[in-house]
Image (spheres, helix red, strand yellow):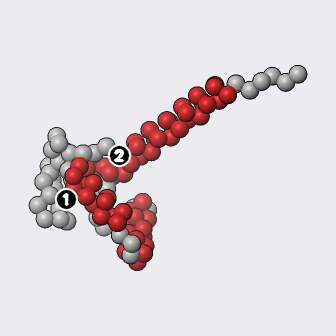
Amino acid sequence: MRKPRDFDSELKALEAKAKELKARKVQQLGELVIATGADALTAEELAGALVALAEITDTGKKEAWAKRGDAFFRGKSRYSAKPPDRDGGSAQTQQSGAPPASGGTGAA
């Protein structure tokens, strides 16, 4: 006679794994925000930029952004952040008037 499956323990294991994967995804997203220098933006500015990006339907723009992202990950980006100077107050402003990082930034 076969031993019955313990569905409860299997379900708990799957839920734990899903929770771990979600936590890793959130951590990696936060690391990406910091690595790109976007942690100098407020939460509202970052959210607005992401919403605008999600609304773009022009595939040419998306492909150009994908190439730029690929170059960033390969270390060839002209616009890469300088991690050692994060707390130095230098504003990396390609946009007008972006304030330096303060206690109210929204890095996840």
Instruction: Give the distance between the C-alpha atoms of the residues marked 2 and 1, in whole angstroms.
Output: 18 Å
Q: Is residue 77 visible?
A: no
Tell me the crowding category of disc 2: few under 14, some 14 to 19, or many 20 or more residues within 10 angstroms, Cα based.
some
Res. 30 mark: 2
Residue 54 falls in which quadrant of the image? bottom left
Name the amino acid type tagged 1.
Gln
Res. 92 mark: 1
Residue 72, given in percent of the width and then of the height, sits at 38, 62
Reading the chain from its start, which is encountered first: label 2 or label 1? 2
Which residue shows up at 64% across the image and 25% down it? 9
Determine the secondary structure under disc 1.
loop
Q: Seen from this angle, which residue lies furthest bottom?
A: 60
Q: Is residue 26 visible?
A: yes
Residue 49, given in percent of the width and then of the height, sits at 27, 60
Residue 60, given in percent of the width and then of the height, sits at 40, 77
Determine the secondary structure under disc 2.
helix
Of residues 10 and 20, the one drawn nearer to the viewer in this rendering: 10
